[in-house]
């Protein structure tokens, strides 16, 4: 068996047998909170495991973090399903919490042709032999990783039916590998994300979403995730692009909120008769726009130039014009600026 296949089988550090050692982390210090309680969270020692997500600037919503950490601590036989609009931070919430606890994550991006065998593993040809290459699910169950089934509501419900017993606590059986039985590691966690709540997409915004089996959904506790509020997104931008003036960051957040309002069709009592957008500016896209604005500083109409690359170059021309008109109204003279800085008399500080 080649070294590449051996490393894929191990799915862990240089010395797999010694890699994942338990460790405890203090809540306030780890997640930059100011709770009055001293709470220790179980994770793993930092061993440079390649499956541990990279830690990035992130502002945690306290309520969602509380629910997530409670699941991490004791799932009580449940899976965890995070539901919310595209780009609102469902996956990043789990990954950034795992990064701070040094907890390896196995990610399975779901598509319409996903089969159970893709998650479990398969035999591969290697120098004339056919060793079994464990899939993300098998590795997570065996080694105590977090499994993320990303966009679960796109999966064929009949394929997911093969996982019912696993969530009920039964060991994983690999018929493809001679009936190998993998006991469920006590630190294994099953997490899924989706744009719908599992009952189909009544909004019509997300193509490919399927109605999931009630028997499957009944095995999950659920966390509803939405876009961060203005204060949180401003804090994220302050961490990621501190060189952008506050006025610019505020205008970016205002535009993002307006685009989302038109995307979801939530008028909040205003703008009756407005055309609904078929795209949105997620937090991920907002950060991309801010970074590109700094990267292309000096370009003609730098904020428009960056927004095209971050979002509007992929939308219909009419919607692109509508978004840019909104941006011009919000940014004012700054929209045609060739610099990311603001005149001194425009700065709010």
Image: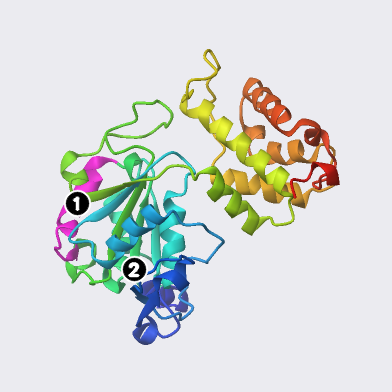
Asked whether the viewer can see residue 309, the reply is: yes
Q: Which stretch appears magenta? A: 156-173
Q: Marks 1/2: CA distance?
A: 20 Å
Whether 347 is among the magenta residues is: no
Crowding at mark 1 (Cα within 10 Å: few <14, some 14-19, many 20+): few
Query: At numbered mark 2, what does the secondary structure look like: helix, strand or loop?
Result: loop
x then y, percent, for residue 133: 35, 67
x then y, percent, for residue 208: 38, 33
Crowding at mark 2 (Cα within 10 Å: few <14, some 14-19, many 20+): many
Q: Residue at x 34, y 68 (%)?
A: 145
x then y, percent, for residue 51: 44, 69
Front residue (pair 160, 272): 272
Q: Residue at x 36, y 81 (%)?
A: 23
Q: Which residue is mark 2?
A: 145
Foreground: disc 1 or disc 2: 2
Image side of residue 57 versus residue 128, left or right? right
Asked whether the viewer can see residue 52, the reply is: no
x then y, percent, for residue 220: 23, 50
Q: Earlier in the sequence, mark 1 or mark 2?
A: 2
Is residue 17 depicted above or below 348 in this figure? below
Asked where in the image residue 134 lies, by quadrant, the reply is bottom left
Q: Report the quarter where the N terminus lies.
A: bottom left
Asked where in the image residue 83 lies, by quadrant, the reply is top left
Q: Which residue is mark 1?
A: 162
Q: Residue at x 62, y 36 (%)?
A: 254
Is residue 291 depicted above or below 273 in this figure? below
Which residue, as the protein is rendered here, is positioned at the far top? 273
Front residue (pair 194, 111): 194
* Label of residue 275 in the image: none
Whether 170 is among the magenta residues is: yes
Q: Residue at x 69, y 40 (%)?
A: 309
């Amino acid at each position: 068996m080649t070294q590449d296949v051996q490393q894929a089988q191990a799915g862990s550090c240089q010395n797999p047998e010694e890699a994942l050692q338990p460790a405890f982390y203090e809540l306030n210090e780890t997640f930059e909170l100011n709770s009055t309680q001293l709470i220790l969270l179980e994770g793993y020692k930092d061993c440079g495991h390649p499956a541990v997500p990279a830690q990035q600037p992130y502002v945690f919503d306290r309520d969602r973090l509380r629910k997530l950490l409670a699941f991490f601590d004791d799932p009580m036989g449940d899976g965890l399903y995070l539901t919310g609009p595209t780009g609102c931070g469902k996956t990043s919430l789990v990954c950034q919490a795992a990064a701070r606890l040094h907890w390896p994550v196995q990610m399975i991006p779901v598509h319409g042709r996903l089969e159970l065998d893709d998650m479990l593993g398969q035999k591969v040809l290697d120098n004339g032999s056919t060793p079994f290459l464990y899939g993300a699910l098998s590795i997570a169950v065996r080694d105590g990783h977090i499994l993320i089934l990303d966009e679960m509501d796109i999966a064929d419900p009949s394929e997911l039916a093969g996982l019912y017993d696993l969530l009920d606590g039964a060991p994983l059986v690999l018929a493809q590998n001679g009936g190998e039985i993998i006991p469920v590691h006590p630190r294994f966690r099953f997490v899924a994300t989706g744009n719908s709540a599992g009952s189909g997409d009544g909004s019509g915004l997300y193509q490919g979403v399927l109605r999931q089996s009630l028997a499957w959904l009944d095995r999950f506790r659920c966390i509803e995730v939405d876009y961060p509020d203005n204060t949180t997104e401003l804090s994220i931008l302050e961490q990621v692009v501190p060189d952008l003036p506050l006025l610019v960051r505020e205008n970016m957040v205002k535009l993002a909120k307006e685009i989302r309002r038109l995307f979801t069709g939530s008028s909040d009592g205003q703008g009756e008769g407005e055309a609904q957008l078929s795209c949105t500016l997620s937090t991920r896209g907002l950060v991309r726009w801010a970074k590109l604005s700094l990267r292309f500083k000096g370009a003609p109409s730098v904020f428009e130039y960056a927004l095209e690359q971050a979002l509007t170059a992929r939308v219909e021309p009419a919607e692109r014009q509508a978004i840019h008109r909104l941006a011009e109204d919000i940014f004012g003279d700054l929209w045609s600026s060739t610099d990311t800085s603001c005149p001194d008399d425009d700065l709010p500080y």
